[in-house]
Every structure is written in C-alpha cells, then in structure tokens.
Image (cartoon, rainbow, N blue to C red):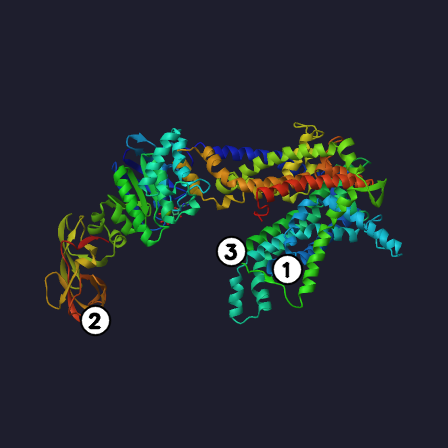
C-alpha cells in the first residue's frame, strides 16, 4: 500500500522484532520445550511435578503465599492511599516518599535487614531473648509474609492513590445532592470506579510474589516455593536438572501469565470515561479518627523505613564473623568494600550502565513505533515487549543460559549475558516510562515539520525527541535504579568474577556475614539514591508521571 | 508557484476507497475550497495533496512537476493545521524559522524573513513568546506565518479556523484572505463551514462521499447548484419534488407541475420527463395577497418572524408542504393564518434531476 514511501520506521520495526525474537522468544521457547522432554528415570517433568510432594507442595505454597501477600498488601495499601488522598495532617509529606522506598531498598536488602532485626541473631530477637521471651522463627511463612507485604504494598498504594486522585469528586457531590450520605456515597460511587485499579495493582503484586526470588530464597527455608526450587534445580550440586528446571519455570510462567491476563481484562473492562483533574481537596484530619489514622500511617512509615536505618547501622557496626556487635561502630566494613573488594561495585556500574543506555535506546524507538508509527509489525512488538512481565528473573536467566550456552551465539560466561538479562528484564518498564509523554504529542506536529521540508527521521529528532526527553530522563533513572538492584536473573547467568552488588550481598547473607552485606547494601542504596535525588531535586523530574 | 492538477485520483485506507477517481484543476494563485460534510474525505484529499497519504491510482501535479511519488517533505508545501501544531518547546520565532533552517538558509536571511512574516500576521511583538503563552487566534497566525515563510509552492489548510470562536474566526479569516492575495500562492482550504467557503474562495469544490458534486465559483454554487444536495449544503434552500411534463434541454425554461399549478423554472442541465426537484432559495420567492398570479401557487402563512433586516415566513401549500420565504425589511399585512400567493421567479428557480 505504501508504494512510494520508503519507510524508515518499517525497517526499525523489523530490527526490533528480530531482537525480541532472539533474546526473548527463542529463550522462552527453549524453556517450554525442554519441559516436555523426558528427564531422569524416564519420567517427564510434568509427571515428576505431580508425583513428587516437594514439587507439588511448591506449587500450592507459591499460590498460597501469592494470595496471602496480595491480601495483606491491599489491606495496607488501600487505606493508606485513601488517607493520603483525602486528608492532610502533620508529616504527611513523608507519605509521599513511600513509593520511593520500593525503589531505594532492593528486595535482597529488605530480606537481609529484616533478618538482622527479627532473624535468629536479630537484635529484636536477642533483646526479647534477654527478657526471656522466645519469638517465633522468622524463617518460613512468618518472615515471607511480613517482608513481602512491606516490599509490595507500595504497588497497591501507588495504583490506588492515582485512581482516587483521578476520581472526579463532583460525582460524589452529585450523589450527596441526590440524598445519599457521604459514607454510602463512597461505597456506591467511588468504589466501583476505583476498584479496577485496586484489583489490577493487587494482581500485579500477586505476579511479583510468584516470581520473587530474593526474599523467597533467603527466608523460605523449609517452605518450598517455585522460584526457589527452580533456581536450585539449576545450580544444584548433584548435577543440574534441566527438565525439572524447565517444568518449574513453565509452571511459574503459566501462573503469572494467567494473572496478567486477568489484570489486562480488568483494566480494559474498568476503563470508564473519567473526567480528570477534579479530585477532592484533602481535608484536615479532625475529631476522633485523628489519632488512629495518624498512628497507623506513622507505623507503616516507620516499618517501611526500618530497612534503610538498619542497613546504615549495619554497615558501620563491628562484626566478628556472623556476630554483630551492635553499638560498636567502625568504618572497617566500608573500607573493605571499597579498598580490598570493589569488584562487585565496578561490575554493577559497568553492566547496569551499558544495559541502561541500550534499554533507553530501544525503549525510545519501540515506544515511538508502537504509539505513533503503527504498521503491520508493531502489534507484535507491542505484545512481545510486555512479555518479560510474565517471566520471573529466574526463568529469564535459565532461558538465556540454555539458549546461549555454546551454539551459534555463545554468550554464557561473558558479561554480555548479564547485560542482555538486565536489558530484557527491565524493557517493559523502560518502554512504558519512555513513551508516557508520546500520547500527549499530537501527530500534526510531526506533519507540520515534514511539510516544512524536514524528512521523517530528522523530524523525529528535531521535534518529537525533545518533547520525549522528560519521560526518557525519568525512564533513565527508573531503569538504572531497578537494574542495579536486579538479582534473580543475574544470579542465574553470572560466572565467577562477574558478581554484582546484589549477587555479592546474596552470597554474604548466605554465609551470615551481615556487616559485610550491609556495607555493600549501603553502597547499592547510594548508587540508587543519588540519581533519584539529582533527578527529582536538580532536574525536577516527576519519576512517577507514567503511573 | 504553480497550480495543482489532480488526475483520476484514488485514495483509501481499507478495501473501499475514500476518494474514487477524482480529477480537479486548481488555477495558479487561486484559493480553492474543499467543502463538504463530515467524513466526506476532505482531510483525506488534502493530506494526499500534501503527500502524507499514498495514492492508489492517478496522478498529482504541482504545475508541470509530477509529485505523485514525492514524499511530503520534498513537495515544498506550506501546511496549516486545525490544532495549530506549533512546536511547544520552540519560541514563536523558532517555529517560524524552523522550515528555513531545514533549508539551510543563512541565519541573517532567516531573521529578516521571520521578521517580515511575523509583521504580516501582526505578531512582531511576540517573537520570543512560547506557543503556550498565545491565544488561539495568535497561534493560528503563527502557524500561517510558519507555513508561508518557506515560500511554498502551495498552501494547504485543514479547517484552520474551526478551533477559534466566532469573532476570531472572522478576524483570522481576513488575515488569511489578505495574505493569500498578497503572496499570490495557490491555496487549498478545507472547511465544512459554507459561509467561510463563500467568503474566501475563488472556487469551491463540494465533496460528497469522495466525489466532487460540483466545482465552481461561490455564486455558481449558490445561484446555480447542480443538485438539491448542493443547494441544501450551500445556504438554505427549499427543495420540492415536482413532475416534469416533457424532456427539456440544458439552459431552457422547463414546465413543471407543482400542487396542480404549472410553473416555469430554469433547467441548467438536460432532463428527461418525470420526477425532478425544484430548488428555490427563500429570498427569490415573493409572497403576495391571494390572487391568481402567473407562476404562483396558493398557500397559507403558518408563521411570521421579524428579524430586523428581513422578515421570514413559513408557509404551507395546499397539500401541507412547508416552504420558507424571506423578504426584505418589514412586510405589512400578511399575518399567520392568512391565505396568500407564493410566486416563483423563473430565472432564479432551478429544476434539477432528483
Ligand atoms: N486513518 C484512517 N483509517 C481508516 N479510515 C479513515 C482514516 N482517516 C479517515 N478515514 C475514513 O475516511 C473517510 C473520510 O475521512 P476524512 O477525515 O477525509 O473526512 P473529512 O471530510 O475530513 O471529515 P471531517 O469534516 O469530519 O474532518 C471517513 O469515512 C473516515 O472514517
Ligand atoms: Mg477533516
């Protein structure tokens, strides 16, 4: 049909699609197909899954944990969002920082710090022990649920807050003018409009719990979980079990894919025409409710910030082997990290740096293609670019390892495979953020530039790109911060000497060397926090504009 | 500068073409208006001329130059958009300079050219403003200056006035008309506002379902519509189904039967006997006291409205058909309920095929 327009965009689309096919589709197909071949003892992976209680309990445990954490996260996130949207009180500004804590505190550090507080050697556990009270073991369900809830409730909080703020408060006034009291108005008018957003973010939490590696491995212990068993069947010392690892990976892909489909369905069904921008003004808190609401919010705040405090304290606390000597301060841990073992820091910066730059390039192009230059290929690109959401890091890592271990593209063992893992894993995130402003740029602007004699590609760089810059900058910060914290895929694909900070922290936690882990943790938090601070304070970038 | 020639153009998005086999000549230096209802293909045709939509068949010429296969950025067009399409991150000056910079014009020349065109649209004082700090009318004038500053071969405008309120619309309309005449650039304007089309155009093309229903000067379309559709779209007209007793030749006075009376009307084109449509504008009809005038039918006044400069009547024929009549000034006598005679002017009443 486009007989006379040589289309640059079509060529770019084809290149993008080829990239996705190689590093996303091909590994995924390898994982799925390996699960169908016969494993040890001639049993197929699926038969083992059903017959071996270890594996079948992992499936039920994972689903159960996902369900519980989804509920607990919602129970914290929704009321907090409502309070933040509708009331004003002293110290409320702090609540605005909550979404940041998820970014600033990587999961592995959250798990670690909670162990330092409530683990067998945790300072709270020991303090209670000194009083003669034995706390229940933090390993297992107790720890898993607590830590994951406080890691993930912010997702529900952010989703709900955006929905409540976007809700047209005139509808409430309309309802009240029709004689429905405020409380019932909320239930009948606001809840139906906001519910899809809450449900969608809750389902997101579910998928994150199912895919979670760091917390599950560190705290799971005797509770078998899919992600942990998948990882163990990959690194197992008694010989890896390729069939089982693929089978388990396939199960987790299936679970997450179902949840994501349900999420998309809810989002598409729940999209009402909402007149934006007339959210209710926050009311000052008054009366009886003041104390419980403020206290509740404060408690959530404190617990959320606890990991940050602990990591700082831990990094400066003297330790003898696994024993933390709380109260004895030292800079030895940090000296060691910077002077004798800086490799993980250097590795992290290099791998994440390359991955972030590539990710921004691809995200910008893909975002532009999908939003502005639809052609026969762009629907596939759109679909594939969301696919990494359905793959946990562990699964992606395993897929890359089976696909590029020797063969036509032997990446395993090189740093490149870590970069690829980072890149693919954070791609949906990068694309969504980089393209968020594109929807507000009218097509006529491009036409205007072209009509004035500027060819399409140059028009993109002269007219569209400058307008995309704020969202690309936000995407840069977000992709960087989430990439330096990446553990679950990189821990599968890395080789000796390529340890990144999260991997090193993970190994140190395994050896119970919390002070060292804290020191790396502190550096990692710094590497995350500094770009965020510069972006938000110096460049005034709204990091969460895309939400 | 050059005229535009369109030969047997076919354009479409899906299976069905939106523009089918359209041919059109637009004279060098003239202002041509594409008029038509929503969805008839005006934007499609304009964007095809601009080069944003590929053609399926047919040819497109700017003067002698065949531009059918030329991409938009090499067609040397000036374009003005409905939503202004100003670059929001560039100042008024940089917006107008944009096309000149793309042509590697020296910065000194750019300065004088931009100054000249901002002067022409009356916005010299606003050169350093950002688009967001301008009113709608000012934005559209910047867009006009930007399109003209590159001295394009043709100027294309898609409903440039429709985002402006009524008063501004007339103002910017004047700016466009003046500038177009001064610069003498071949211009295609898209609108669905018939008054705008009549006021601005040298020639008008009325588009209906991707085909040109009539092309002609404003008076042609108003006074000599080729169909009831044209008459109805360009100004209000009474259209009445009539019987033609005998075939007529083009340009002759035909005899038609209406409400039992035998009327004379002008036939612009040859017509067979049988069903036809009578077109009569309200202001060409005369209302008088009931009498057996020639070329008239009896009627009853249903409603009378005094509108200042004119008086509007709604009358009903014997069979109940309603007709609007407009008379100059105040008309004494004739109130609602009165019987009257409605006289048709043979020269200004048209009969066309139904
Ligand atoms: N991108 C597109 N893809 C498919 N069909 C289209 C597209 N753009 C327009 N059409 C169809 O082509 C026909 C003509 O559309 P066009 O935009 O040219 O109308 P228009 O005369 O400019 O109308 P309006 O006065 O409402 O702007 C319509 O039926 C429309 O639905
Ligand atoms: Mg249009």
Confirm or deny contact between disc 3 and disc 1 (CB under 8 A).
Answer: no
Corner quadrant of residue A228: top right
Instruction: Confirm or deny contact between disc 3 and disc 2 (CB under 8 A).
Output: no
- For mark 3, what is the residue? A276
Residue behind mark 2: B336
Visible residue check, residue A9: yes
* Total numbered circles: 3
Q: The numbered mark 3 sits on a residue in which chain?
A: A
> How many C-alpha atoms fall within 10 Å of the one at disc 2: few (<14), some, or many (≥20)?
some
Which numbered tag is attached to residue A89?
Answer: 1
Pointer 1 local density, CA inside 10 Å: few below 14, some 14–19, many at least 20:
some
Query: Distance of mark 3 from mark 2, alpha carbons?
Result: 51 Å
Q: Camera-side residue: A403 or A541?
A: A541
- Residue A358 screen position, x and y as percent: 60, 34
Viewed as shown, does residue A457 lie left or right of B48?
right
User: Quick check: B149 left or right of B339?
Assistant: right
**Badge 3 and badge 1 both on one subunit:** yes
Q: Indicate which label's residue lies in the foreground, 3 or 2.
A: 3
Q: Is residue A43 above or below residue B320?
A: above
Query: Label 1: chain?
Result: A
User: Which type of secondary structure does the marked residue at label 3 adopt?
Assistant: loop
Looking at the rendered image, the disc whose residue lies closer to the viewer, 2 or 1, is 1
- The alpha-carbon separation of the residues under discs 3 and 1 comes to 25 Å
Q: Quadrant of residue B58?
A: top left
Q: Nearer the viewer, mark 3 or mark 1?
A: 1
Q: Which mark is residue A326?
A: none
Mark 2 within 8 Å of ligand 1, using the beta carbon: no
> A525 and A479: which one is in front?
A525
Asked if marks 2 and 1 fall on the same chain, the answer is no
Label 3: few (<14), some (14–19) or many (≥20) C-alpha neighbours in 10 Å = few
């Amino acid at each position: 049909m486009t007989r006379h327009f040589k289309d640059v965009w079509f060529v770019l689309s084809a290149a993008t699609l080829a990239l996705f096919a190689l590093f996303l589709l091909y590994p995924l197909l390898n994982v799925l197909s390996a699960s169908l071949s016969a494993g040890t003892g001639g049993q197929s992976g699926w038969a083992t899954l059903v017959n071996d209680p270890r594996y079948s309990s992992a499936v039920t445990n994972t689903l159960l944990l996902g369900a519980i954490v989804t509920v607990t996260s919602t129970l914290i996130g929704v009321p907090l969002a409502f309070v933040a949207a509708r009331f004003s009180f002293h110290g409320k500004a702090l609540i605005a920082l909550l979404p940041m804590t998820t970014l600033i505190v990587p999961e592995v550090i959250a798990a670690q710090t909670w162990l330092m507080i409530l683990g067998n050697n945790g300072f709270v556990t020991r303090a209670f022990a000194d009083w003669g009270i034995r706390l229940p073991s933090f390993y297992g369900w107790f720890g898993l649920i607590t830590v994951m809830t406080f890691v993930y409730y912010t997702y529900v909080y952010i989703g709900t807050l955006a929905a409540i703020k976007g809700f047209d408060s005139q509808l409430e006034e309309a309802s009240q003018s029709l004689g429905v009291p405020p409380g019932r108005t909320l239930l009948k008018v606001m809840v139906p409009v906001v519910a899809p957003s809450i449900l969608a973010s809750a389902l997101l939490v579910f998928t994150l719990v199912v895919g979670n590696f760091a917390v599950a491995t560190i705290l799971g212990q005797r509770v078998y979980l899919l992600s942990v068993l998948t990882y163990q069947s990959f690194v197992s010392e008694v010989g890896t079990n390729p069939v089982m690892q693929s089978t388990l990976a396939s199960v987790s892909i299936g679970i997450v894919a179902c949840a994501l489909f349900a999420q998309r369905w809810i989002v598409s069904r729940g999209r009402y025409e909402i007149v934006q921008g007339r959210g209710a003004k926050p009311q000052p808190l008054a009366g009886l409710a003041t104390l419980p609401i403020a206290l509740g919010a404060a408690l959530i705040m404190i617990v959320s910030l606890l990991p940050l405090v602990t990591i700082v304290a831990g990094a400066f606390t003297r330790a003898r082997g696994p024993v933390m000597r709380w109260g004895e301060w030292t800079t030895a841990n940090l000296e060691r990290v910077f002077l004798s073992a800086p490799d993980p820091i250097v590795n992290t910066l290099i791998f994440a740096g390359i991955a972030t730059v590539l990710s921004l390039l691809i995200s910008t192009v893909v975002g532009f293609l999908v939003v502005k230059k639809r052609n026969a290929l762009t629907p596939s690109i759109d679909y594939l670019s969301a696919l990494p959401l359905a793959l946990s890091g562990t699964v992606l890592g395993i897929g890359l390892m089976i696909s590029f271990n020797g063969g036509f593209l032997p990446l395993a063992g090189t740093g490149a495979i870590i970069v690829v893992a980072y890149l693919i894993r954070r791609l949906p995130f990068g694309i969504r953020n980089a393209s968020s402003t594109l929807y507000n740029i009218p097509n006529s602007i491009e036409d205007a530039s072209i009509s004035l004699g500027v060819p399409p590609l140059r028009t993109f760089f002269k007219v569209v790109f400058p307008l995309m810059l704020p969202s690309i900058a936000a995407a840069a910060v977000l992709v960087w911060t989430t990439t330096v914290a990446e553990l679950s895929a990189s821990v599968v694909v890395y080789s000796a000497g390529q340890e990144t900070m999260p991997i090193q922290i993970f190994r140190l936690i395994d050896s119970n060397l919390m002070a060292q882990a804290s020191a790396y943790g502190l550096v990692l938090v710094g590497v995350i926090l500094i770009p965020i601070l510069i972006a938000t304070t110096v460049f005034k970038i709204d990091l969460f504009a895309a939400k | 500068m050059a005229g535009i020639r369109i030969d047997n153009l076919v354009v479409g998005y899906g299976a069905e073409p939106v523009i089918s086999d359209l041919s059109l000549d637009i004279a060098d230096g003239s202002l041509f208006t594409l008029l038509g209802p929503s969805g008839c293909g005006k934007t499609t045709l304009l964007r095809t001329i601009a080069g944003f939509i590929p053609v399926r068949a047919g040819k497109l010429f700017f003067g002698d130059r065949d531009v059918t296969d030329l991409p938009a950025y090499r067609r040397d067009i000036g374009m003005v958009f409905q939503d202004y399409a100003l670059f929001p991150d560039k100042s008024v000056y940089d917006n107008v300079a944009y096309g000149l910079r793309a042509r590697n014009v020296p910065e000194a020349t750019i300065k004088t050219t931009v100054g000249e065109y901002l002067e022409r649209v009356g916005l010299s004082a606003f050169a350093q403003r950002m688009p967001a700090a301008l009113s709608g009318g000012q934005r559209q004038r910047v867009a006009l200056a930007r399109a003209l500053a590159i001295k394009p071969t043709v100027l294309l405008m898609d409903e440039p006035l429709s985002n402006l309120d009524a008063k501004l619309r007339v103002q910017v309309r004047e700016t466009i008309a003046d500038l177009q005449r001064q610069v003498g650039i071949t211009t295609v304007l898209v609108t669905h506002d018939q008054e705008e089309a009549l006021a601005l155009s040298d020639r008008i093309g009325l588009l209906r379902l991707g085909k040109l229903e009539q092309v002609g000067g404003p008076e042609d379309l108003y006074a000599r519509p080729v169909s009831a559709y044209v008459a109805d779209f360009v100004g209000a007209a009474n259209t009445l189904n009539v019987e033609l007793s005998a075939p007529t030749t083009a340009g002759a006075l035909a005899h038609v039967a209406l409400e039992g009376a035998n009327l004379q009307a002008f036939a612009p084109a040859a017509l067979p006997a049988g069903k036809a449509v009578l077109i009569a504008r309200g202001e060409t009809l005369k209302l008088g006291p009931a009498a057996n005038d020639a070329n008239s039918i009896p009627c009853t006044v249903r409603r009378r409205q005094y509108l200042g400069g004119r008086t509007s009547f709604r009358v009903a024929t014997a069979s109940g058909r309603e007709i609007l009549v407009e008379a100059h000034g105040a008309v004494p006598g004739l109130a609602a309920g009165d019987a009257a005679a409605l006289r048709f002017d043979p020269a200004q009443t048209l009969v066309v095929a139904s």
